[in-house]
Image: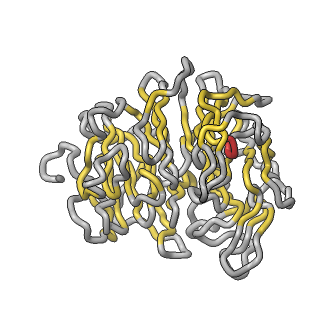
Amino acid sequence: MRWSVVASTALLITACHDGTAPGDLQYRSLFPMAASYWGMCGLRKGGTVECWGGLPDPPFDATVPSSAVPVRLPPASPRLVFLATDDAGYRCGLEADGRAWCGGYDEPMAALDTPLRFERIAVIGGAGCGITSAGVLHCWGDERRLPGVQPGTLPVCRPATAFEPEVRCAVTPLRIPMDRRVASVSGGGERACLMLEDGEARCWGVNRLDYVGSEPALGVLGTGNTVDEVVITPEPVQGGLRFVAVQAHPFGEGACGDVTGDGVYCWGSPPFGRFEGETTGREFLAAPTRLVPPEGRTLRGLALGGAGACALDQEDAAWCWIRSPDPVQALGNLRFESLAVSGFTACGIAASGAWCWGANGQGTVGNGTTADQPIPVRVLGQGEAGED
């Protein structure tokens, strides 16, 4: 079974699985609206995208800041099959033919001016990256987040203000030279990681992680580089592991990857779980370190959220680290194909459709209420009598 990731703070993890539910109203994938919005989105089998929980403007109406039931993307939005946003509100989406649409927090999404078509897309702190069917990486947007781009070489796209420095941008996608095909890319905050076709992970961005009230940590990229600098060229993560999926934390606190048959490894300062060799918990991980699994379980398919994480075990049961340092199994005897996490809320795709559980103050569970749900409940509007 091979896993793939399409992410920034918006994660999509999809597995090969035989169990499906009939009808175009079923959701076939889920992805967080953004770590800071407490919202979730789902792609229906019929090809439409709907979101629930916190709904940022745009693309939604600012007079409706949240919804406890799924809301379809406005008619003016392109027919997206994937939507990715970051915690600053930058977002990009893909249409079925691979055309990319992007927009900032206070502007509508527009099609990128390029003939390129992408199979995967991610957003990274005001920038976007896409991977073509040939495994070629292209990136655009804020120069500070683009791999391999020397500072000060791109044109100014946003002049300096009294509060912000000028920003230089790539308006159209730039080809990022790599020595092998790129399989996935994800980002969060000031850092990003990609995975090559052979499973090697490489990361770039700010190599310093600041802690409130304590000394900063150097080496958050996990590459063995402990210099306080901005790393421009993606560097290999140390340890020589080969991953089947890699995801950067939505807020840039590190990254994690799946190793077939061996579980989940993380580096940096992931805000969840316990890791092998730790003595006090929440220790800084300078190199990929194995996440301690539940007894007798092997983890895979990790889904990172801003405040927690979930993963699948070898029996497709979901385990989550949300408001708990130890993994808690999702109740209900459900078996999932994929997982997604937004804030303190988890969701998953099962054979019977989309289910969510956890914090629900803004309706992120999608069951029509704002009461927290400790047990998975089925998201409304999936077309099965008696279950909605």
Residue occupying the point 67% across, 55% down: 262
The quarter of the displayed image where residue 342 is located: bottom left
| Residue 217 appearing in the image | yes
Where is residue 227, by image quadrant? bottom right
Q: Position of residue 26 (x, y in %)?
A: 28, 40
Q: Nearer the viewer, residue 340 or 112?
A: 112
Q: Which is nearer the eye, 366 or 336?
A: 366
Relative vertical location of residue 190 with respect to residue 308 in this rendering, above or below: above
Foreground pick, 39 / 140:
140
Residue 127 sits in which quadrant?
top right
User: Viewed as shown, does residue 361 lie left or right of 297?
Assistant: left
Q: Position of residue 92 (x, y in %)?
A: 48, 38
- At x 34% / y 53%, what residue is drawn? 55
What residue appears at the point 44 percent right and 31 percent down from the top-left corner? 110
- Residue drawn at (80%, 64%) of the image: 218
Q: Is residue 365 left or right of residue 29?
A: left
